[in-house]
Image (spheres, helix red, strand yellow):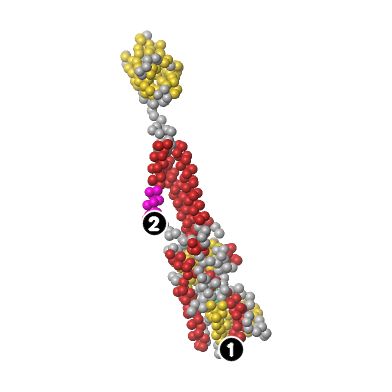
């Protein structure tokens, strides 16, 4: 019902189940009615049915169904009915206090048969009238057919399981043994269930699965509460996880979805951070061409989306097909998660070098190479070509004479390609008394620049070589 619940669900360690209505079907059936000395079966069933007239508990439905076959005439009616959650129902039947519910001390005659039914995993409720036990009803609550398989699935996924039930210890133990559940706790009323959930969640991250009948507070107190679809309306709307059906494979499937979702979040995060940490320095150092980088950025987003879309496949083949992955990476995956990005980035860098239009060039600017020529009499001249690439170039010429009063006149610069002879005159701009900028269009190849000038009336000349790449 929320992303937060999904995240908590992914880290659950222990799954506790309610028994009646959750591990067992809501449909229950009376298998046997035991009567105390001096009472009749019809009496016992009539009192029980009167008490259960308004209850929606699976045991109540079974008792009403069984009583419906006995004669209607003279059936007693219950007044001031009181539901005691997790224990049973109390009322006045024919003006006498009566009760149906969890057995207390039993008369000797009933003790043995009740124990026998409980050991078979059936639920036995007693019927009392005027503080006297008049009989007991054994009710078979069939286990959901997929209960065993889904418990086994939880164990395979590294989870522990428990039953928290209000039913008798023997009956709960029988169910626990049939399903292979790790730990059982029985004869809990709703408050005790709540306490047990609180105590257990101190020790392990707990998922409580219930139907909301007598276990709504426990569902709310667990780290994650899961209501099954056949349960009460309030449980479905107030729990963290609501299963739409009552298929118990929904429990491991929900954990499977939660773990897979969490894994995808972590993978995507690790990829996005790792990608940028690796790619930014490579790009800044000039190892990745901007075109390849732009392509890789788009590809990186696609990797994240494609990885997330894997989740859409979950559950396509039914709930039973969703297996919770084990938490943490296996050895193979851990190695792969390091090797794969390294290979990817190596490939990206090599690809960059292969397809880049700027291959072999550095994207960082280079300092121009400055030539210094002595003028005689202590001063010197400096020349550099900026930017030293084909196209429009600027040749900078500086004079640093030894005296401040030195006059510089008749400055002239020409450029000629080496080998063929004809010189090209340069456009020339005096920026300061000693700084000249000469503009020239240059093609690739070796060039010779010749400078002529008069320093204090004396003619002088020098040349520098440059290769345009
Ligand atoms: P569970 O915890 O296994 O789901 P409940 O908490 O619903 O079981 O009920 C626990 C016990 O309380 C039952 O085993 C039964 O003895 C008694 N009980 C609860 N509700 C009823 C009822 N309506 N009629 C008879 N007995 C009841
Ligand atoms: Mg229940």
Whether the magenta-drawn stretch holds residue 356 is answered as no
Residue 451, disc: none
Residue 153 makes an appearance in the image: yes
Q: Residue at x 45, y 39 (%)?
A: 293
Answer with mark 2 or mark 1, whichever residue precedes in sequence: 1
Q: Residue at x 40, y 47 (%)?
A: 341
Question: Which residue carries the number 1 mark?
Answer: 39
Give the number of the mark in front: 2 or 1.
2
Tag 1 secondary structure = loop
Q: Quadrant of the C terminus?
A: top left
Whole-angstrom CA distance, mark 2 to mark 1, is: 66 Å
In front of the other: 77 or 117: 117
Q: From the viewer's perspective, is residue 385 above or below residue 99? A: above
Label 2, ligand 2: CB separation under 8 Å: no
Asked if marks 2 and 1 touch (Cβ < 8 Å), the reply is: no
Kindly give the residue lying farthest to the front in the view shown: 317
Which region of the structure is painted magenta? 329-340
Q: Residue at x 52, y 58 (%)?
A: 316
Q: From the viewer's perspective, is residue 340 above or below residue 448? A: below
Kindly give the residue lying farthest to the bottom in the view shown: 38
Question: Which residue carries the number 2 mark?
Answer: 330
């Amino acid at each position: 019902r929320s992303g937060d619940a999904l995240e908590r669900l992914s880290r659950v360690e222990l799954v506790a189940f309610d028994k009646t209505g959750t591990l067992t079907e809501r449909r229950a059936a009376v298998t046997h009615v035991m009567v105390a000395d001096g009472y009749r079966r019809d009496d016992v069933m009539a009192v029980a049915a009167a008490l259960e007239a308004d209850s929606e508990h699976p045991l109540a439905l079974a008792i009403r169904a069984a009583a419906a076959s006995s004669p209607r005439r003279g059936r007693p009616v219950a007044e001031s009915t009181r539901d005691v959650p997790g224990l049973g129902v109390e009322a006045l039947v024919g003006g006498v206090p009566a009760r149906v519910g969890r057995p207390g001390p039993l008369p000797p005659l009933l003790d043995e048969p009740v124990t026998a039914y409980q050991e078979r995993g059936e639920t036995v409720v007693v019927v009392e009238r005027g503080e006297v036990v008049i009989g007991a009803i054994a009710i078979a609550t069939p286990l959901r057919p997929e209960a065993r398989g889904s418990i086994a699935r939880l164990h395979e996924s590294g989870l522990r399981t428990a039953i928290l039930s209000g039913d008798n210890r023997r009956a709960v133990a029988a169910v626990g043994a049939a399903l292979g559940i790790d730990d059982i706790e029985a004869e809990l009323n709703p408050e005790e269930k709540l306490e047990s959930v609180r105590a257990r969640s101190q020790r392990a991250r707990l998922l409580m699965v219930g139907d909301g009948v007598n276990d709504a507070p426990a569902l709310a107190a667990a780290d994650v509460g899961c209501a099954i679809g056949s349960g009460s309306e309030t449980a479905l709307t107030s729990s963290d996880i609501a299963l739409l059906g009552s298929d118990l494979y929904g429990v491991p499937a929900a954990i499977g979805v939660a773990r897979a979702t969490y894994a995808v979040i972590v993978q995507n995060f690790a990829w996005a951070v790792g990608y940028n940490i690796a790619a930014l320095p490579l790009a800044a150092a000039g190892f990745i061409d901007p075109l390849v980088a732009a392509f890789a950025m788009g590809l990186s987003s696609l990797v994240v989306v494609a990885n997330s879309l894997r989740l859409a496949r979950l559950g396509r083949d039914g709930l039973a097909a969703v297996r919770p992955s084990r938490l943490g990476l296996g050895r193979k995956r851990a190695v792969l998660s390091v090797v794969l990005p390294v290979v990817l980035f190596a490939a990206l860098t090599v690809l960059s070098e292969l397809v880049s239009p700027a291959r072999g060039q550095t994207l960082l600017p280079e300092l121009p190479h400055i030539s210094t020529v002595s003028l005689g009499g202590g001063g010197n001249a400096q020349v550099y070509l900026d930017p030293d690439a084909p196209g429009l170039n600027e040749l900078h010429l500086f004079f640093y004479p030894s005296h401040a009063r030195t006059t510089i006149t008749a400055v002239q610069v020409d450029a000629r390609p080496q080998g063929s002879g004809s010189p090209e005159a340069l456009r020339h701009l005096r920026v300061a008394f000693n700084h000249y900028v000469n503009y020239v269009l240059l093609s690739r190849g070796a060039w010779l620049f010749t400078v002529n000038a008069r320093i204090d009336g004396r003619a002088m000349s020098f040349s520098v070589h440059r290769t345009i790449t």
